[in-house]
Amino acid sequence: MKLWEGRFDAPTAHNADLFNDSLPFDCKLWAVDIAASIAHATMLGNCGIISEEESKLICEGLNGIASDIAEGKLEIEGAEDIHSFVENELVKRIGDAGKKLHTARSRNDQVATDFRLYARGAFDCLTDSLVWLVESLCDRAKAGLKLIMPGYTHLRKAQPMCAGHFFNAYSEMFLRDLERVRASRDRANVMPLGSGALAGTSYPIDRDITCELLEFDRPCENSLDGVSDRDFVAEFLFDCSLIMSHLSRLCEDIILYSTEEFGYFEIADAYSTGSSIMPQKKNPDIPELMRGKTGRVYGHLMGILTVIKAIPLAYNKDLQEDKEGFFDAEKTTINCVNIMAEMLPNITFKKERMARSAEAEFCCATDVADYLAKKGVPFRTAHAVTGKIVRECIKNGRTLQDMTAEEYKTFSDVFDGDITEVVKAKACADARTSFGGASTESVKRNLKSIKKRLKQYTD
Ligand code: ARG
């Protein structure tokens, strides 16, 4: 039965129903829809808008529906949307009292309330997953404290660093995501219920009661905005998009570092796949797929931004398009965060290769220039002298490490015997003790701070 069929002479066309119905996807909202209806019915009873008895009957009926759905005894089908389904079912069970549930309420404030309740849960799940991921990154950073690897700019070797620095960098990104998710959740936690269709209601409702029952921070203060605001959906999708972008970067690094060419990481067999034709292949399908899934989450963000960009106040049916993208982004992002958290401990480091690579290709050249500059040579001159050394080395097939102190001295008499110690990758990394730098000490400090900041999401 349609909730609104009284005004119509003829039923809707079958295909119009198929096009219009949201039940196939908003069935996910059944639990929050029932919770919000129970709060609404309780408030109606408390305010004397319906009798206490009717209110009790409605709440019992709704609880019965909830447990039947949860136990798989009640199939969600045969209605336009989840709101109609629950109401129809209630009337089937308790008769006329059920028909009073929708007093002082519209599906417009109902769906906006349900979706915010649902979104709250999604923000919380996302938080839990992100916490797990950062914990996983912290473990890898701890293991990386003992290792040296090259850092890159322009994907060209730049300077040696303690390998923990790499993982901490990603922890910083996901900590920002945690902060963003929390702020978005806070902003979403405002209650539209009581806004009615668009203009509030003439019944003596008490929105503070429903607000408290549903644990919202406050009722929204403008009913027009209340029923049509989907900023929280856009924010959720933006948060997911940025999380996916961070994951995608991490995936890209993992894919690169596990190539034959880099050879720093090895992804365990359990998280790798093979080729149907090339027997030697071990492919990084998991991080590749994750990188690819970033696209659909960005797409959903673009989708909601486009849906909301020109809707006139207040509710318009366009807004029904707010859900599928949200659900898909929620599932995709949480799944990707979880699988990354699970895969990280299954990546082994090829320590020698990393350390060797951190010294190769003149990775320590900045430290040669700094050596001279610290002894009074203007940095720009020191840079030029070191550039010349690099050029000569390339010409003669030498490295900064196999040059003797005497040979260094031919480029500048400022060089002393200790220059050969300066060009060791570990020494170069550990010299960068500045706050936030790549020395083992700085990385340890960073790791400690990351763990401390993470705690606020677990306590
Ligand atoms: N299924 C609708 C949605 O998801 C529920 C609200 C319908 N309201 C209305 N006035 N048609 O947006």
Image (cartoon, helix red, strand yellow):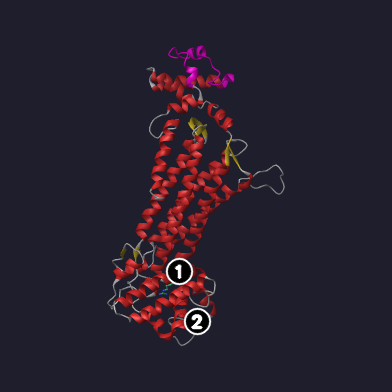
Q: Label 1 neighbourhood size at 10 Å, few (<14), some (14-19), many (20+)?
A: many
Residue 108 visible in the displayed image: no
Q: Position of residue 321 (x, y in %)?
A: 46, 66
Q: Label 2 neighbourhood size at 10 Å, few (<14), some (14-19), many (20+)?
A: few
- Which residues are the magenta region? 394-422
* SS at circle 2: loop
Q: Nearer the viewer, residue 113 or 276?
A: 113
Q: Residue at x 36, y 71 (%)?
A: 39
Dot 1 amino acid type: Ala
Q: Nearer the viewer, residue 271 or 459?
A: 459
Q: Determine whether 206 is above or below 118 in the image.
A: below
User: Residue 414's quadrant in the figure?
Assistant: top left
Asked whether mark 1 and ligand 1 are closer than 8 Å, the reply comes as: no
Q: Nearer the viewer, residue 363 or 380?
A: 363
Residue 257 visible in the displayed image: yes
Q: Determine whether 322 is above or below 371 in the image.
A: below
Q: Nearer the viewer, residue 389 or 177?
A: 177
Q: Determine whether 377 is above or below 141 in the image.
A: above
Residue 244 covered by magenta stretch: no
* SS at circle 1: helix
Left-right relation of 10 to 395: left
Q: Position of residue 260 (x, y in %)?
A: 63, 37
Q: Position of residue 77 (x, y in %)?
A: 53, 75
For disc 1, the marked residue is: 31
Q: CA distance from mark 1 to mark 2?
A: 28 Å
For disc 2, the marked residue is: 12
Left-right relation of 324 to 56: right
Left-right relation of 434 to 250: left
Ligand 1 quarter of the rendering: bottom left
Q: Position of residue 213 (x, y in %)?
A: 35, 68
Q: Circles 1 and 2: CB distance less than 8 Å?
A: no
Dot 2 amino acid type: Thr
